[in-house]
Amino acid sequence: MAKQVTTKLRQSASLILLAKDKNAVPSTPTYDYNALLLKRQSKSSFMPDSSVFPGGVCEATDASPAWLKHFERHDVGAAKLKEFCQTTQIEALNPNDQTLNTVLSLRLTALRETFEEMGILLCRDSKTWTNTDGYASFNEQFDRKHWQHEVHNDASKFLTLCEELDVLPDVWSLHEWCAWRTPSTFKARFQTAFYLTALKEQPNVLSEVNEVKDYYWHSPLDYLQSALRKEIWLPPPQFYELSRFLNFKSLEQLRQFAQKREVKGCVLIHPVMYKCTDGMVHLLPGDDKYPENPDATSDKIETALSTAAFRALAKNLHRSEHKNQHESQLLINFDPSDGQVNPIDPRTL
């Protein structure tokens, strides 16, 4: 008998940082930007040694009303914040338990976690309050190591840091990109909002040694090819989203797409794991075989079929097929309802 799902979901947020590659040659068929990924420590409790975008679990302080007072002190009052919050937002797990609008609190989580893990503070000051070019600003002119330690030990210190520096977290440069939920087969489960932001230059990384084993700035294609060569391990959300970026050679093109698309919201991607005779299949929303209740069981679902035979049962495909941790293939043959682009197979490039 299949086990019922009892694991509680935790809300989290991640930040996809994309920066112009200063070494990119104009008019060449390569990507003119790099993405920042960190490699988790081997002792990490969730997906150790994986290469992921910065991010983590939402803390109560990320939804504190004290943030509203901080924004108001910089002439960003309730009316301006309400206007900002009119954009379609990623659904909160507990919408009735929010002291700060989810549009803001999830962005604050992504920004705080990025500072905790990578020492990168995306913010606006008196010179950049009215910046409208769509690119994020960052500040490195303070004792980052000290404050990174403070915020890592106490999430509420992120607000203190912003007050001390007289800056606002750059929530305006973050665009809703996607939302993923951990499969029901995992003991630790998260619903993660992924935000995308673009930078004109790469900031200097100051990685947090307890959480970060290593970090990289590479193009989407470089990451995916490294994963296929078994040099790094990209969990499904990272592999999928980096494959989406293969549609965009230009950072400006990608930034404009993300900015325009986010008003359509995000389809929550909740993989359901099926066991085939020659590998695993993660079914995704919209696939003909996707179950009505993706949380019905905490077990992998047996098919007694090969991945090819299981695929033949569906006309509308949205799935990833896995031979092992490194060899995977993404399949989707319809346009997403949220206006997103489909992933491209890196092996075809």
Image (cartoon, helix red, strand yellow):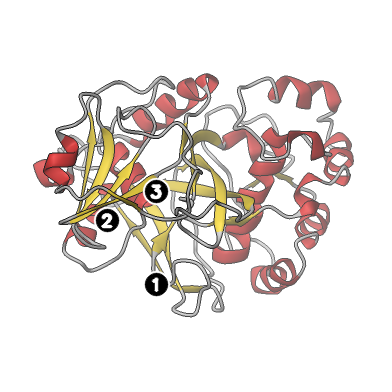
Position of residue 288 relative to residue 5, above or below, is above
Q: Residue at x 75, y 49 (%)?
A: 62
Position of residue 302 relative to residue 317, above or below, is below
Q: Residue at x 68, y 20 (%)?
A: 86
Residue type for callout 3 = Pro
Q: Quadrant of residue 81?
A: top right
Question: Disc 1 marks which residue?
Answer: 49
Question: Disc 2 marks which residue?
Answer: 223
Q: Earlier in the sequence, mark 3 or mark 1?
A: 1
Report the side of 10 relative to 271 (left or right).
right
Quadrant assignment for the C terminus: top left
Q: Marks 3 and 2, Cα distance to the nearest angstrom?
A: 13 Å
Check if mark 3's residue and mark 2's residue have beta carbons within 8 Å: no
Residue type for callout 2 = Tyr
Secondary element at tag 2: helix
Q: Marks 3 and 1, Cα distance to the nearest angstrom?
A: 15 Å
Q: Residues within 10 Å of mark 2 (few under 14, many from 20)?
A: many
Q: In which quarter of the image is residue 104?
A: top right
Question: Disc 3 marks which residue?
Answer: 237
Residue type for callout 1 = Asp
Report the side of 275 relative to 128 (left or right).
left
Report the side of 23 relative to 118 (left or right).
left
Secondary element at tag 1: loop
Q: Residue at x 51, y 25 (%)?
A: 262
